[in-house]
Amino acid sequence: MNFSLGLSKLINFNSKKFSLKIFNQRLPFIYIFFNTLYKKFIANKNVNDQIKKFHQSGFTKLDVNMADIIDEYKDKFLIEENKKDKDTKRQFLSLNDLDKKNFMVKIKNKLRPSIDQLENYFNCEVVVSDVKMIRNYNHNDQNNLDVEHYSNHFHQDSYLMTYNKIFINLMDISENDGPLEIVPDERRKSFIKSFNYKDRNDYNASGDSSLIYKNTGKKGDCFLFSSPRVFHRAGVPQKFRDNMVIIIVTIPKYNHQHLNIKSEENLFDQNYKYFEKFTKPFSIIAVIKMFIELYKYKFYRKREF
């Protein structure tokens, strides 16, 4: 079992090096193949302008704001002492269980129209599977590629495009507050060349900054992006940045039972082991089976609706 896992990691590592040279992406080749076919044969391109932007560039601002909900609960946010990073550059915020549930019910209800649009795009149900509220602090290692405190080096998340994130600003975020930084899909090739990008710990940190989009905005603004498709990193704030991360997964309705989400407060429980089966398959055969299943499901949904 350990040998198989080690072999899989070795193949993925070499596959990523190949993918970077040929496709300007730092993902396993089979994931790129899956994503390309999904966008061509499963994704619905007859969508609104926001989702078209997401399809083309890998990110979009959502037409919804959560400031009223944040203001209702902000005085109840707690620092999770047992989840402090060792170097204290990042802390996790939380709520008591009852407030977690009520808070997430309101957030999900307000996100529902956007989720509906995504389900139309993916031709499959989209589920909120994991939630984190994070405070990033200032540090002096932004351009030191030997040190990474909180994903503050450019990278792609090694998942299928069925794994996506919604960032919600828990405060007003300017360029001084270390916003999320993203390379749009259409600028990826120029980014690789300008930054001489090889890996998250091996690139020229003084590349062309005009290629990068910074997610600044007001408290409550919502930002959808495909973290497997686009290069991105956490910016470094002058003081700190409070941000909410919602992980959403594209998964057929008949598999929802496997996510083990019994109530909204469970969304804060780090549910990776449940949804990774559907977003991070570890073999070529598993990826192919996943594509075939989702391709068939597209037509099943059309019959149902």
Image (tube, rainbow, N blue to C red):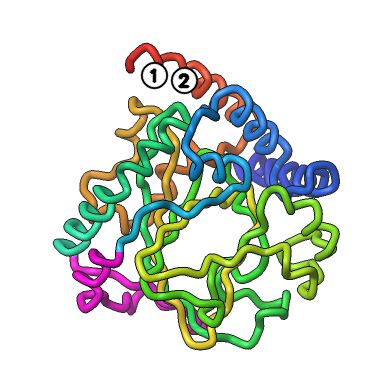
* Vertical comparison of 283 with 242: above or below: above
The x and y percentages for residue 44 are 52, 27
| Magenta-colored span | 67-96
Name the residue located 14 percent from the left edge and 62 percent from the top edge: 98
Q: Give the image quarter of residue 66.
A: bottom left
Q: Name the kind of residue labelled 1 in the image.
A: Arg
The x and y percentages for residue 265 are 23, 56
Q: Report the residue marked by disc 1.
A: 301
Q: Which mark is residue 298?
A: 2
Quadrant of image for the C terminus: top left
Q: Along the line of sight, which residue is nearer the eye, 229 or 213?
A: 213
Q: Along the line of sight, which residue is nearer the eye, 74 or 271?
A: 74
Dot 1 lies on which element?
helix
Quadrant of image for the N terminus: top right
Name the residue located 25 percent from the left edge and 74 percent from the top edge: 74
Q: Does residue 84 show up magenta in the picture?
A: yes
Asked whether the residues under the numbered discs 1 and 2 touch, taking CB atoms below 8 Å apart as contact, a structural biologist would say yes
Q: Name the kind of residue labelled 2 in the image.
A: Lys
* Vertical comparison of 202 with 47: above or below: below
Asked if residue 60 lies left or right of residue 77, the reply is right
Name the residue located 79 percent from the left edge and 42 percent from the top edge: 23
